[in-house]
Structures are given as structure tokens and as C-alpha cells.
Image (cartoon, rainbow, N blue to C red):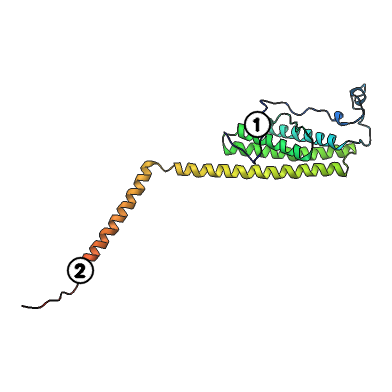
Amino acid sequence: MDITIGGLTSQQSGAQSGNSVRSAQSFVPGQSDSEKTGNNGTSAFAAATSVSLSSGSANRLTTDQIVSAINESLSSTGISIGNVDPGEYTPEAVADRILARVGDLIASNADSEAEAREIFDKASEGIQKGLDDAREFLEGLGALNEEINGNITETEERLNEGLKSIEQRLTELYNSSASEEAAESITPERDEQVLQSQITQTAQASQAYAEAGTNAQRNTPRYGTNG
């Protein structure tokens, strides 16, 4: 099924089935892996009341939360958007890349409207859950400041706008397909029957008109002179 959804494009990266597995510890600045994890295997920063994260680190964490939630939501379908690396972790880049991958999934795996809608709905649910999870996690770290919350909100707005565009495209696509199928359901035999009926009706109307004219002519008073 070769379609473009929502004006978004991305390169197919092949089969990717793994969920995002980047550890939350990797976002905490100024610590080595050994410092981030204690001898008992628990995170060293778990007891901290707050963590200071850069805007970029928070955006990466948000991306991972969204991707993980989408893949979890899609798990029952057997497909996944895999790992998403937008290259530049800005709200625009993150939203565009995630939406493009959702579009790829629909185009590559949906052979019917029902399948397309299922993928779209599950991806939408995952996106919202991922955003909520990111906010909750960052708030728990004490890192959800005004700037970071603003970035998450901008990412959410861009994602929601993109999802609306994808949904509109699906509606247009499948409504168009339904119209084409309805047109194709009129068989040549049916076309011939309709045409024959129209010819018959026209002929009957012409005959009735001619008979009416003949009768009128017969009933017209005739004038003449007697020789």
C-alpha cells in the first residue's frame, strides 16, 4: 500500500522490534555509570530530592518515554516503531520523527481501514501515555521546571496537530476508496440495463407524443367549399 500520510516522510530503517531501552540514569549529568548505580544495584540518585537536567536531556528522556509507550501500546499488533533518533532533540524534530514513523507503520502494515485505524489509535494512546509518563518521571526527579514543561507541552501540541493530519488523511483516503469501489460495483450488464431502460422510456415518450399529435390532427375541423 503506497501512500503518504499527513505530508510526513521518513526513510524506512528496516525491521526494528526493540523498545526504547535507554536508562533514565543516562540523563543525570556529571555521573559515571558506577556512580549512578550503587553496590546493591539500586540507582544512586534515587534518594535525591531533585535533579538538574538540561533541556536537551529532558527532551531525550521525553522521546524515550513516548517511544516506549507507543511500542507497548502496539505490542498486541506484533509491530513496533522501534527506536527513534530524531538527531536533534527539539520539540519539532521529536514530533516530526515520531509522526513520520507512525505514518510508516500505517503505510507498511495496514491493508484495510480497520487495520489502519487500529495502528493509529494505539499509537495515539501510546503518545499520550508517554507524555504523561515523561512529566510524571521528571516531576518525581524535581526536574520539571518551567522550560522543560514548556518543551513537553510544545512537543505534545505538535504531536496532536500531526495526529489530526494523519487522521484526516486516512478519512480522505478510505472515503475515496469507498467511492471508487461503489463506482466499480456497477457492472457492464448493469450499465446496459440502465441504458436500455432509458432508451425504452424515450421511445415510449416519443410514441405517446406522436399519437397525441395524430389524434389532434384528426379532430381538427376541416374547412372546404362544395363544388
Secondary structure under the numbered disc 2 in the rendered image: helix
Left or right: residue 212 versus residue 177 is left
Question: Gap in Å between the C-alphas at discs 2 and 1?
Answer: 79 Å
Of marks 2 and 1, the one in the foreground? 2
Q: Residue at x 77, y 32 (%)?
A: 87
Res 7 → quadrant: top right
Left or right: residue 33 versus residue 87 is right
Q: Nearer the viewer, residue 127 or 47?
A: 127
Left or right: residue 43 versus residue 123 is right
Q: Residue at x 68, y 37 (%)?
A: 122
> First in sequence: mark 2 or mark 1?
1
Query: The disc labelled 1 sits on which kind of residue?
Result: Thr
Residue 85 percent across, percent down from the top left = 75, 31
Q: Nearer the viewer, residue 117 or 55?
A: 55
Q: Give the number of the disc on residue 90.
A: none
Query: The disc labelled 2 sits on which kind of residue?
Result: Gln
Answer whether labels 2 and 1 touch (C-beta < 8 Å): no
Farthest-out residue, left:
227
Residue position for label 1: 77
Quadrant of the snapshot with the N terminus: top right
Q: Give the number of the disc on residue 217.
A: 2
Label 1: how many residues lie within 10 Å, few (<14), some (14-19) or many (20+)?
A: few
Q: Residue at x 63, y 35 (%)?
A: 106
Residue 147 percent across, percent down from the top left = 86, 43
Res 139 → quadrant: top right
Residue 22 percent across, percent down from the top left = 80, 28
Res 67 → quadrant: top right
Secondary structure under the numbered disc 1 in the rendered image: helix
Left or right: residue 217 versus residue 77 is left
